[in-house]
Image: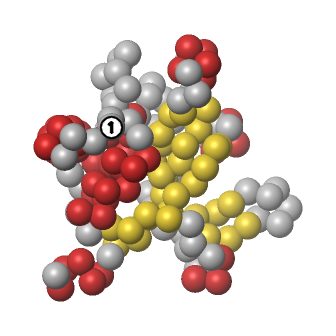
Amino acid sequence: METLKQVEGSKDCLACVAAMATGTTVEEFKAYYYKHNLPFAQDITFIRYLWDNGYMVGAFAPEDGTWTVNRSTGVVLLSGPAYLSVDSEKELVRKQGACHAIYWDGRKLHDPAKTTKRLSEYKVKSILGIVKNLAHERW
């Protein structure tokens, strides 16, 4: 999978993650939030966009096999895609209480900013697992 990169100085990281998660484009995400008059770069917009594109977002129990915890390191290992909210490297963004969005495809991290680092180099604030809503195709 190709990592979509945000335009330097933009706040498009969440749009890039949504596009990577759904196989759509950043432009389609932007058109969606404009059409529905939703707040940009907020989790609720991301969740609604994924829902309308046939995905469910949320925390999942380890018993369902979507994630496990490495007992020696305490690191959560996700077997499926996820949206990770991490501390931004930009001090001004952190002071505003905002975070940076990165995408986990089930095997590899994709950071819309400059370069993707190792997971241990990020300060992860939250993880939302992403699964295909199989019932969506029957609607």
Q: 3 or 64, which lies in front?
A: 64
The kind of residue tagged 1 is Pro
Quarter holding residue 53 = bottom left
Quadrant location of the C terminus in the rendered image = bottom left
Task: State the residue in front, 82 or 44.
Answer: 44
In this view of the protein, which residue sits in the foreground, 35 or 134?
Answer: 35
Residue drawn where x is 50% and y is 65% of the image: 58
Q: Where is residue 99 in the image (x, y as percent from the top left)?
A: 54, 33
Taking depth in this image into account, of 40 and 80 the one nearest to the observer is: 40
Q: Residue at x 28, y 54 (%)?
A: 49
Residue 51 picture location, percent across and down: 30, 64
Q: Under tag 1, what secondary structure?
A: loop
Residue displayed at 43% across by 47% down: 43
Q: In this view, does 17 lie to the left or right of 116?
A: left
Q: Where is residue 104 in the image (x, y as percent from the top left)?
A: 48, 53
Q: Is residue 129 above or below residue 90?
A: below
Residue under label 1, please give it.
39
In this image, 103 relative to 53: left or right?
right
Residue furthest right in the image: 72
Q: Where is residue 33 in the image (x, y as percent from the top left)?
A: 23, 42
